[in-house]
Amino acid sequence: MRIDIITIFPEMFDGPFSESIIKRAQEKNLAEIHLHQLRDYTTDKHRKVDDYAFSGGAGMVMMIEPVARCIDALKAERDYDEIIYMSPDGELLDQKMANMLSLQGNIIILCGHYKGIDERIREHLITKEISIGNYVLSGGELAAAVLVDSMVRLIPGVLGDETSALSDSFQDGLLSPPVYTRPREFRGWKVPEILLSGDEKLIAEWKYEQSLKRTKERRPGMLDEES
Ligand code: ADE
């Protein structure tokens, strides 16, 4: 999978993309992530990418020209399956969406700033808008990092068997069951006996019941959703 991210703050991705699973995915050539500084695509001598909103109102607006120029340059090199704009107005990211997107070959992610982006970018250049939650961030970068993490860990081969995404919360429409490690007892708090029994069938049943119980208690809405 190839992911091209358009941003005015490429350094914001240094941490999230150079550690742990995303780092490993890139090293294994299972994910290729390219960062593009939007300011490199402006013809303005001050490298300005924002301007005042027509009709006034508070806040600056991201201009269409540099964004269009950057997207055109990328599209001239290859086809893209989706051109995504990170926005609180977008469709809410969930595990199902992450699964679908992880199957794509090439995607572009545009990170917005200021009061928003010129509406014509959304109308004519963007194919999908995604929100990571009902709150407003200062820009699209943190949201894009969340989206990339949720997709990349699902690419086959990125996670080993022991950390397989198949056992993640949400993956089968249920939250994950509780997990324990050594010691068997700490301050009198014991690991459930059944997990030490070695009986795989009973353990599998227990895990399923715990998942169901946890989902009913914490996210009852998930049980009504069609998968
Ligand atoms: N940009 C600002 N807030 C956002 C959010 N909640 N999700 C995605 N992109 C955003």
Image: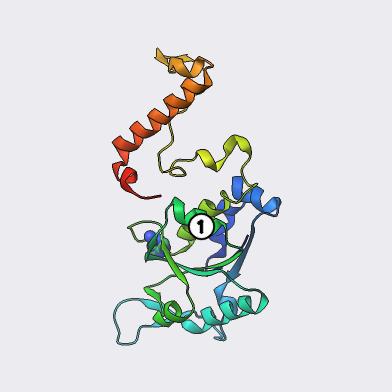
Which quadrant would residue 62 be assigned to in this image? Answer: bottom left
Residue 199 placement (x, y as % from top left): 52, 17
Residue 170 seen in the current view: yes
- Up-down relation of residue 129 to residue 193 (above or below): below
Q: Callout 1, which amino acid?
A: Met
- Up-down relation of residue 199 to residue 215 (above or below): above
Identify the residue at image location x=57%, y=40%. 164
Identify the residue at image location x=57%, y=58%. 103
Residue 140 placement (x, y as % from top left): 45, 64
The one nearer the camera, 222 or 190, is 222
Mark 1, Cα crowd under 10 Å, few <14 / some 14-19 / many 20+, is few
The one nearer the camera, 45 or 201, is 201
Task: Quickly name the residue at label 1.
Answer: 100
Disc 1 secondary structure class: helix
Residue 146 seen in the current view: no
Residue 40 placement (x, y as % from top left): 60, 77
- For the N terminus, give its image quadrant: bottom right
